[in-house]
Amino acid sequence: MQKEIILSPLQGYTDYVYRNVYASCFPYIDSFITPFLACENDGTIRKSKRKDISAENNSVVKPIAQILPGTVDETKILCQLLIENNYTELNLNIGCPFPPVVNKGRGCGLLTHPEQVDKILRSIFNNFSGKVSVKTRTGLNNHNELYKIIPILHAYPISEIIIHARYGKQLYKGSSDVNEFLKYKDLIQIPLVYNGDIDNHNYLEFTANKLKETKKIAIGRGILQDPFLPARIKGIAILNEKQQFINFITCLHREYLDHTETPKHAHTKLILLWEYMSAYLKPELKAAKKIRKTTNLTTYNETIKSLIKEHYRISDPFGS
Ligand SMILES: Cc1cc2nc3c(=O)[nH]c(=O)nc-3n(C[C@H](O)[C@H](O)[C@H](O)COP(=O)(O)O)c2cc1C
């Protein structure tokens, strides 16, 4: 079965620059979800968050906008922002496990309050006329808390539910449990999307074996680590991978420079991405460490050139 692949949101990484560059370089991902939008304490939404979902910054690929409300009032504010920006699809985050988020009754914090999930969903469907999907974990304290939410989810015309098969208290420890996902698949009547730990080393085990019957998957870190992973999963031939990878990182460089206030900001963004992207290069090159040590775009460029040269054994990777 040919899988459909969603880029799972990664706050701080898969911003509009990354999404646009990815989509203009590669045709491998079916849909993109933005990192979450949330309200500040006074009900406002940060400028950087508005920028990430604005129409002008999302002309290459229209993403699905993700919201992280904890109350009905926040839900209304976030839906209004999406309507103003002509969004026709939103994703409700009830899975974020970070303690500051959970303590505010958002993300995974909602999984122990079914009545609040109900109020938030009712408000979404009253205020937003587009498609609505949900992204969640299996619970906050254990894998069973999602069970209590199922009747509520079934009461609304939700298009699909993405399940990261960890519970919140695990944060990112242990592994995402496919069997827990499959248990929910038997109980939930809404199409389910699997998420968690699919990467370049294990994708065959997941796609050909554990998730053979699952049509749609969401991948976050695995795509940052290897931008060709969705093509490998779909069995799409990758022509001239070396040159495509070089184009991709060149384009990321150029676009971050264009879309950040100073070269220093662009440099900070790029070295952050390489914390994951370095996995694409040979481990012995210790790429992440070398890139992190660079202090500006000039030394960054020199380091990237020499890493690519060593990885691909080519004399002049950027042809300059
Ligand atoms: C740094 C970081 C930021 C994340 N930001 C978000 C987010 O904004 N919204 C969300 O639903 N999930 C977020 N996630 C969770 C991922 O989307 C995904 O569910 C999780 O990483 C498991 O999938 P993966 O193993 O394919 O990365 C984040 C994860 C990480 C590591």
Image: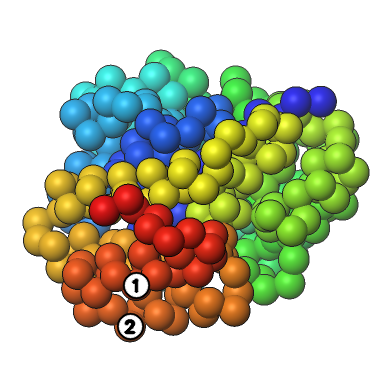
Q: Please identify the quarter of the rendering in which residue 317 is found.
A: bottom left
Q: Which residue is mark 2?
A: 293
Q: Amino acid at mark 2?
A: Lys
Q: Position of residue 82 (x, y in %)?
A: 30, 29
Quick one: 91 or 23, which is closer to the camera? 23
Residue 262: x, y in percent? 9, 61
Q: How many marks?
A: 2
Residue farthest to the left? 261
In this view of the protein, which residue sits in the foreground, 296 or 320?
320
The image's colour scheme reads: rainbow
- In front of the other: 231 or 38: 231
Mark on residue 303?
1
Q: Which mark is residue 152?
A: none
Disc 2 packing (10 Å; few <14; some 14–19; many ≥20): few
- Residue 288, located in which quarter of the rendered image? bottom left
- Residues at marks 1 and 2, CA–CA distance in whole angstroms: 10 Å
Residue at image position (9%, 56%) is 261
Q: Nearer the viewer, residue 222 or 140?
A: 222
Report helix, strand or loop for mark 1: helix
Name the image quarter holding residue 60. Answer: top left
Please name the residue shown 42% across and 39% down the image. 22
Residue 46 is left or right of residue 127, and the answer is left
The image shows residue 13 at horizontal and vertical percentages of 39, 56
Determine the secondary structure under disc 2. loop
In this orientation, does residue 14 appear? Answer: no
Q: Are marks 1 and 2 in contact (CB under 8 Å)?
A: yes
Quick check: 34 left or right of 135?
A: left
> Taking 10 as reference, is 182 left or right?
right
Q: The N terminus is located in which quarter? A: top right
Q: Tell me which amino acid carries mark 1.
A: Thr
Residue drawn 39% across the image and 70% down it: 306
User: Where residue 73 sits: x, y (%)?
Assistant: 31, 41
